[in-house]
Amino acid sequence: MEIITLEKLFEEYILKASKEISEKYPFQASIILCVAIEVLGRLLTAAGGSRHRFITALDHFEALKDYRKLHYTGKRNTKCNKLYDLRCGLAHNFALNNTSCVSISSGVNDLDNNIVGVKSLFNDVKSAWETFQNDHPEKMNDIQFQITGTVTGATQTNAIQNA
């Protein structure tokens, strides 16, 4: 059985994985990095759903402050974010979810033109993670999940249990 701690989740499954695929597959890397933003938000607050946690992380971490430019007011006067809209569409059906989405590039950000560069996003998420590590060292060994069996990509043969 493999135990995945918070630190291992971020270091190996988020940062290392997204860095390795970012130049060849920026869309896929952006999904991983956006999930990381949402996880950081979950670590800050148990309240609300995924959008609330995503926006909480953007509003909390100085390293992610530039992505606040992508905030907008949605239906019923709710706080929304164009990067979250892209993450949601790509993660759930691998298609754009909203016409207000941003574009993804393999390079650096041009947020004034709604372009998120995966290199910038990677560095910003990494910096936010490092801030969280410094502020909450007691959480680094928190178990995120346990894997029973081998991780081969065949979901039907592996049991993943919440710790």
Image: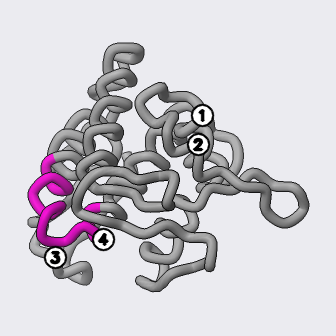
Tag 2 or tag 3, which sits nearer the N-term?
A: 2
Calculate the distance from the C-alpha at mark 3 to the C-alpha at mark 1.
34 Å
Tag 3 or tag 4, which sits nearer the N-term?
A: 4
- Tell me if residue 155 comes above or below residue 124 in the rendering: below
- Report the residue marked by disc 1: 59
Q: Tag 3: residue type? A: Gly
Residue 68 x, y percent position in the rendering:
58, 42
Please report the residue visible at 36 percent of the width from the left and 51 percent of the height from the top: 109
The range drawn in magenta is 16-29
Q: Secondary structure at mark 2?
A: helix
Q: Residues within 10 Å of mark 4 (few under 14, many from 20)?
A: many
Q: Quadrant of residue 10?
A: top left
Q: CB atoms at circles 1 and 2 under 8 Å apart? A: yes
Residue 153 - label:
3
Depth order, front residue of 44/26: 26
Q: Secondary structure at mark 3?
A: loop
Please report the residue visible at 43 percent of the width from the left and 76 percent of the height from the top: 90
Please report the residue visible at 15 percent of the width from the left and 56 percent of the height from the top: 17
Calculate the distance from the C-alpha at mark 4 to the C-alpha at mark 2.
20 Å
Asked whether 54 falls inside the magenta stretch, the response is no
Is 142 situated left or right of 78 in this image? left
- Report the residue marked by disc 4: 27
Confirm whether residue 24 shows in the render: yes
Q: CB atoms at circles 3 and 2 under 8 Å apart? A: no
Please report the residue visible at 62 percent of the width from the left and 71 percent of the height from the top: 100
- Report the residue marked by disc 2: 68
Q: CB atoms at circles 4 and 2 under 8 Å apart? A: no
Q: Residues within 10 Å of mark 3 (few under 14, many from 20)?
A: few
Mark closer to the observer (4, 3) = 4
Mark closer to the observer (3, 1) = 1
Mark closer to the observer (1, 2) = 2
Calculate the distance from the C-alpha at mark 4 to the C-alpha at mark 3.
20 Å
